[in-house]
Image (cartoon, helix red, strand yellow):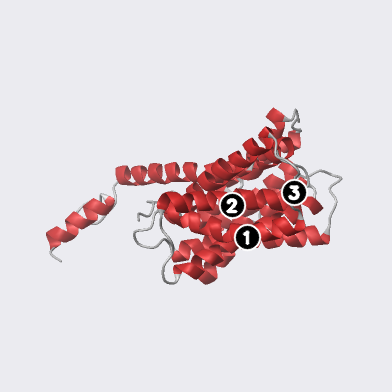
Amino acid sequence: MSVSASVSTATAQGGSTPGGSITPRDSAKAAKAAAGIAALAAIGPATWGTTYVTTTELLPPDRPLLAAALRALPAGLILLALTRRLPSGDWWWKAAVLGLLNFGAFFPLLFFGAYHLPGGVASTISAVMPLLVAGFGIGVLKVRPTRRTLIAGLVGVIGVALLVLRGSAAVDAAGITAMLAATTLMALAVVLSKRWGRPEGVSLLALTGWQLTAGGLVLAPVALTAEGLPDHFTGANVAGYAYLGIIGTALAYALWFRGIERLPASSVSFLGLTNPVVATLAGLLLLGQTLTPWQVGGLVLVVASVLLGQNLRRPQRR
């Protein structure tokens, strides 16, 4: 490649000067682009924070696995119908693995933990995901976590604990094990998604549809066997399932996977901490709950952790 061609390529990709350096203006643009991608990716866990309110107010009681199956499988089938693209080659098993980690195994463990633990304990355990992603990143991505990442991860755990824990919180060994396993699976899914990327020519919606369908096919028979269907569905039930399936799953996970694709894995993992923040605010606004001074301090720490955990470098392009 000629010198002039090298300069043109570098300029087109990064806007760098002929000397190869990045100007402050280029860095500012890259940081702004990364911040925009992070903001969109955060919509995913933010909508997951409304799941508790939606479930308690709109869905039939005592059917968490049915809710999980109806979140995943219909959304996956709709995306498959829209994109008209199936996996090929090794992406058959990769999509199955990611679908199992993100949905098929994650959802049952999550609901089991939620039913056996107070919400505060469950949320605090899930807040260790950035630290787990950092650990998996060493072995899978060959990326060592920075001191800033580790500090931000600890701050996030402390902040979530202050935000959602109560002094009378009970401890159940089975629930803790299930929640820790669920959080570990999701952290592993983030790292593997980063490692495997996306097949050439396949849209993000198609990739999301593969995973949702794979996970939903695992969840559906388990839900029907263990819980069955309610006698009838009300309009509120249908609205709740539609919201969770379309907004809280198809759209939310597409944006989440886009964030994984474009941002460092550690940065995306911290965005998951917006989940307990939104859940707390939803309870405040919709259920008439109040915040204590300790919870306000926890909220500040969680937001600080999310911001500290972001690596606003130039986003990756596909």
Q: Nearer the viewer, residue 66 or 205?
A: 66
Q: Nearer the viewer, residue 23 or 249?
A: 249
- Residue contact at pointers 3 and 2, CB within 8 angstroms: no
- Residue contact at pointers 2 and 1, CB within 8 angstroms: yes
Residue 188 bears which disc, if any? Answer: none
Task: From this view, report whether residue 282 is shown above or below residue 158.
Answer: above
Q: Amino acid at mark 1?
A: Gly
- Residue contact at pointers 1 and 3, CB within 8 angstroms: no
Q: Secondary structure at mark 3?
A: loop
**Residue under label 3:** 63
Q: Quadrant of the N terminus?
A: bottom left
- 10 Å crowding of disc 2: few (<14), some (14-19), many (20+): many
Q: Secondary structure at mark 1?
A: helix
- Image-based side of 72 in relation to 125, left or right: left
Residue found at x 73% / y 47%: 161
Question: Along the polypeptide, which appears first: circle 2 or circle 1?
Answer: 2
Task: Give residue 53's position: percent from left, percent from top.
Answer: 70, 37
**Residue under label 2:** 72
Q: Which residue is the extreme one toward the front?
A: 231
**Residue under label 1:** 104
Task: From this view, report whether residue 31 is shown above or below residue 112.
Answer: above
Question: Along the polypeptide, which appears first: circle 3 or circle 2?
Answer: 3
